[in-house]
Amino acid sequence: MRVLALVFLMFIVGATAQAEWLEASSDHFVIYSDQKEKSVTDFAARLERFHAAMAWVYKQEKAKPSPSNRVTIFVVSDRAQVREVVGTNNRYLAGIYIPRAGGSVAVIPKLKGASKSDLTGETVLYHEYAHHFMQTNTHRAYPRWFVEGFAEFFAGVRFKPDGSVGLGAPPYYRAMELSYGRPVPIRRLLDFDGGVGSKQSYDSFYGQSWVLFHYLQMTPERAGQLPKYSQLLATGRSALDAAEAAFGDLDRLNRDMEAYLRRRNVNILMVGQSSLSIGPVAVRKLRPAEAQMMPVIIESKVGVGAEEAKRLVVEARKIAARHPDDPTVQAALAEAEFDAGNDDAAIDAADRAVAIDPQQINAHLQKGYALARKVQSGALPKESWKDVRSQFVRANKVENDHPIPLVWFYLGYTKQGELPTKNAIDGLEWALELAPFDASTRWLVAQQMIADERFGDAVQTLAPLAYSPHPGEHTDRALELLQSVQTRLEAAGAE
């Protein structure tokens, strides 16, 4: 239970009455903020330039994501507000990012730009979006040092007045840990888990990961070693074997890293403005009803516990009663009612939203969730799973590449105790293509692959989950299952 949530709600509801909330919509991001239009527009453009710079470096640009697969960013007043939304007293928290299929969200303090010496909310967002970018563009698992070094490298972004972007600027906020923290021994750093499973705690892991990645990426004497390392990993070599084959003597590598860290200046990777193609940023002022509901929307999207949901729905009902004809407000009420366990009320609110705006995707989803829970609870007969599937088919027609209707169409069979159709399995796997960062979807796909005895595919699917930079409820089980499937594959190969 997040005891600070009510304080946040009381504070922001008062502020919202005077605030003019804006929505900035671009190819890869949706931003909600009550700052001035230029500030919000410039932020959206910076994010798109950041994405374009990474895409240029790796030449892996994909088609634009569907609307709900963009990252939604809520900009709140300060770090204290971020902590209150999350429900933590961690004074070092500068921002959060939650990867979810069809609903990845970030919450950061008001925009002040990236800082050379301070870990700002914007810098945290660049770090986390680098993870998002990597997971979206590769299906492989990488060692932890590489994953975090990659994110730290790209989080050091500098936006130049001429439109160019610099990547790899030093993270000065890591200086203390690199100077005084316990260093990770080089072989432990290069092992797949980066020393996470050891009894020792290593304070300088992130800083060392940045040094190693930057050194390999930017120095002529190590040119070509990072791609070779990646290729060796792809062939199945262990993390340490690949490192020794690509980087040579690891003790020397460690000495070279220490010398690199002592350099007064390091190069950054410049990407010229002509190489950065970004789409337009559309800005609109939220309707007064939407602005009033923003605190509820932010809390709901971040996630609420049972007690908090009961408090939040009371505020949602008050706002919705004043604005019965606003589809966004009614959809937000449907979500709040569902979170509070009120399935019939959630369905009623969702129906009101869809009656006003048939394209209101969140309302379609909340109705589907509520119907599914009613079947699971016994309030509706087991045969009603077909109605659940039909509801998510309707949602799919609103947004064809939204992953959640695809996932729930599949679940509509398995939760009913029936074998999923090929169409349902194909849809589930496409949902993972759309949202490869979503742990729950990845887990479902791996389970289905194992059931279908596609063990090689299951290993590839499980590995990014087992070694995720965002450990979650599936991580330990995924590692255990991965090892079990690998054993079965090895046994089958020996026969």
Image: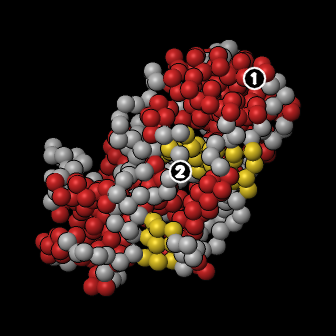
Above or below for 378 versus 299: above
Q: Residue at x 52, y 72 (%)?
A: 160
Tell me the distance, in whole angstroms, between the alpha carbons under discs 2 and 1: 30 Å
Residue at the extreme bottom: 220
Type of residue at label 2?
Answer: Leu
Type of residue at label 1?
Answer: Ala
Q: Can residue 459 be seen? A: no
- For this rendering, which residue is in front, 202 or 488? 202
Q: Which of the 4 image quarters holds residue 177?
A: bottom left
Q: Quadrant of the N terminus?
A: top left
- For this rendering, which residue is in front, 69 or 374? 69
Secondary structure of the residue carrying tag 2 is loop
Q: Can residue 111 be seen? A: yes
- For this rendering, which residue is in front, 416 or 166? 166
Q: Residue at x 69, y 66 (%)?
A: 279
Above or below for 285 versus 151: above
Q: Nearer the viewer, mark 2 or mark 1?
A: 2
| Residue 76 marker | none
Q: Which of the 4 image quarters holds residue 164?
A: bottom right
Q: Quadrant of the C terminus?
A: bottom left
| Residue 320 marker | 1
Label 2 crowd (10 A; few <14 / some 14-19 / many >=20): some
| Residue 111 marker | 2
> How far across and how far down the image is residue 473, in percent?
41, 36
Q: Earlier in the sequence, mark 2 or mark 1?
A: 2
> How far across and how far down the image is residue 242, in percent?
27, 70
- For this rendering, which residue is in front, 299 or 289? 289
> How far across and how far down the image is residue 241, in percent?
23, 69
Label 1 crowd (10 A; few <14 / some 14-19 / many >=20): many
Secondary structure of the residue carrying tag 1 is helix
Q: Residue at x 86, y 33 (%)?
A: 356
> How far across and how far down the image is residue 224, in percent?
35, 82
